[in-house]
Image: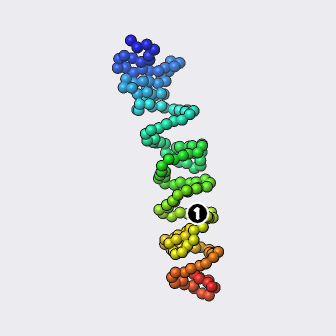
Amino acid sequence: PVKNTLGTRNPENVVLISSDMKRGIITKDGKFGFNTQTPNALLDVQGDVLINTTLDVNGITTIHNTTASTNPATGALVVTGGTGIGNNLMVGTDAKIGKDLQVDEDLNVNKTATIGGATKINDLSTSTNPATGALVVAGGAGIGQDLNVGNTVKINSNATSNNATSGALVV
């Protein structure tokens, strides 16, 4: 016989008790359950788990809670420190950045991007044609108020003005 063991030699469950209460189980097919007598996975914990160091997950992690997030301290997943993502991040619906967003490579927006504050482009690339420069707009551009240009303006097609003091081009 093997010494210093916990378990059975028969196909039976091992029930873990304390204070005469069932606290957990090791099923006859090897599943561990804490605060449940019917574990649905190899490890099934009903209640909170505290991990004081690193939790390494080599497979897919799925969170089934659907609690919405209204601020950084709410939602189905709350991270109080920084988060490093080694590959990509897919967001199904809305993403809100509370402060700064730094993009070190390309940023692709496939639909409308609404920017509530000032947008600054620090790239000093010069423009030699409509397809080059620090800001390139492939389609039309609508400007709701003033446009201030600090240097040369080149117009490569026709410009229309409604009158001599306002419109698309006033000289």
Quadrant where the image shows the N terminus? top left
Q: Residue at x 55, y 81 (%)?
A: 155
Residue 15: percent from left, percent from top: 44, 21
**Residue 45 horizontal/vertical position (percent):** 48, 31
Residue pictured at 37% horizontal, 20% vertical: 12
- Observer-nearest residue: 103 or 100? 103
Q: How many marks?
A: 1
Q: Is residue 126 above or below residue 4?
A: below
Tell me the quadrant of the picture where the C terminus can be found: bottom right
- Residue 119 lies, with reference to residue 51, above or below; the image says below
> Residue 79 location, x and y as percent?
57, 43
Report whether 27 appears left or right of 49.
left
Disc 1 marks a residue whose amino acid type is: Ile
Q: Residue shown at 60%/63% (left/top)?
A: 116
Residue 95 can be seen, yes or no: yes
Query: In the current view of this chain or complex, which residue is farthest to the top?
Result: 1
Residue plotted at (59% across, 79% down):
153
From the viewer's side, name the closer residue of 43 and 18.
43
Q: Position of residue 17 (x, y in %)?
A: 49, 20
Residue 75 in view: no
| Residue 125 occupies quadrant | bottom right
Front residue of this view, candidates 102 and 21 = 102
* Chosen colour scheme: rainbow
**Residue extending furthest toward the bottom:** 164
Secondary element under disc 1, as helix, strand or loop, is: loop
Q: Nearer the viewer, residue 91 or 136?
A: 136
**To which residue does mark 1 refer?**
115
Crowding at mark 1 (Cα within 10 Å: few <14, some 14-19, many 20+): few
User: Image check: 61 left or right of 144?
Assistant: left
Relative to 74, residue 30 above or below: above
Residue occupying the far left of the picture? 11
